Amino acid sequence: MNVAYGIVAGLLALFHLYGGGVKVVRSRERLRPMMAWVDTSPMPAVRAIGVLEVRGSGGLQEGPGGPLEPPEPLIRRT
């Protein structure tokens, strides 16, 4: 289970890292074909969304219980 969680979390983290990095680095003209909403949004807001996505990718990989550990169950069985 930990291996499956690690693979899924790692893939999600990579997708968020790529998507956020694109928003941070590329210009409005290069973002327009992929994301039409950048025309109506100020670029500092687009960059801020990208930074939040990049920072969030680290949290996805870290996991809620530590590195690559699934969360604790709500009800503990004894």
Image (tube, rainbow, N blue to C red):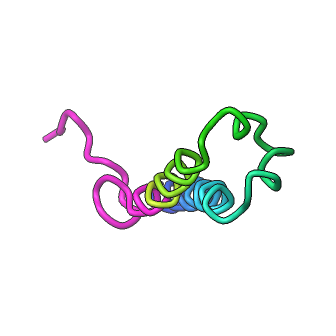
Q: Is residue 8 visible?
A: no
Image quarter of residue 76: top left
Instruction: Return the residue nearer the eye: 8 or 16.
Output: 16
Residue 63 image offset from top left, x and y in percent:
38, 56
Q: Residue at x 36, y 59 (%)?
A: 69
Relative to 18, 69 lies left or right: left
Does the magenta run of residues contain 76?
Answer: yes
Span highlighted in magenta in the image: 57-78
Residue 36's place in the image compared with 61, above or below, is: above
Residue 65 in view of the camera: yes
Which residue is situated farthest in the left direction here? Answer: 78
Report the side of 26 relative to 43 (left or right). Answer: right
Is the residue 78 above or below the residue 44 in the image?
Answer: above
Q: Is 33 in front, or is 70?
A: 33
Identify the residue at horizontal 31%, vertical 48% (top origin). 71
Kindly give the residue lying farthest to the right in the view shown. 33
Q: Main secondary structure of the magenta part?
A: loop
**Residue 14 drawn in magenta:** no
Q: Nearer the viewer, residue 22 or 6?
A: 22
Left/right of residue 48 with respect to residue 29 in the rendered view: left
The quadrant of the rendering that contains the C terminus is top left
Up-down: is 46 above or below 37? below
Q: Is residue 46 left or right of residue 55?
A: right
Query: Where residue 14 sits: x, y (%)?
Result: 61, 62
Count of picture labels: 0
Residue drawn where x is 81% and y is 52% of the image: 29
* Residue 42 position within the rendered picture, expressed as x and y whole percent measured from the top left: 59, 42
Counting from the top left corner in percent of width and height, residue 56 is at 45, 54
Question: 30 and 10: which one is in front?
Answer: 30
Could you tell me which residue is drawn at 66 percent across and 65 percent down?
Answer: 25
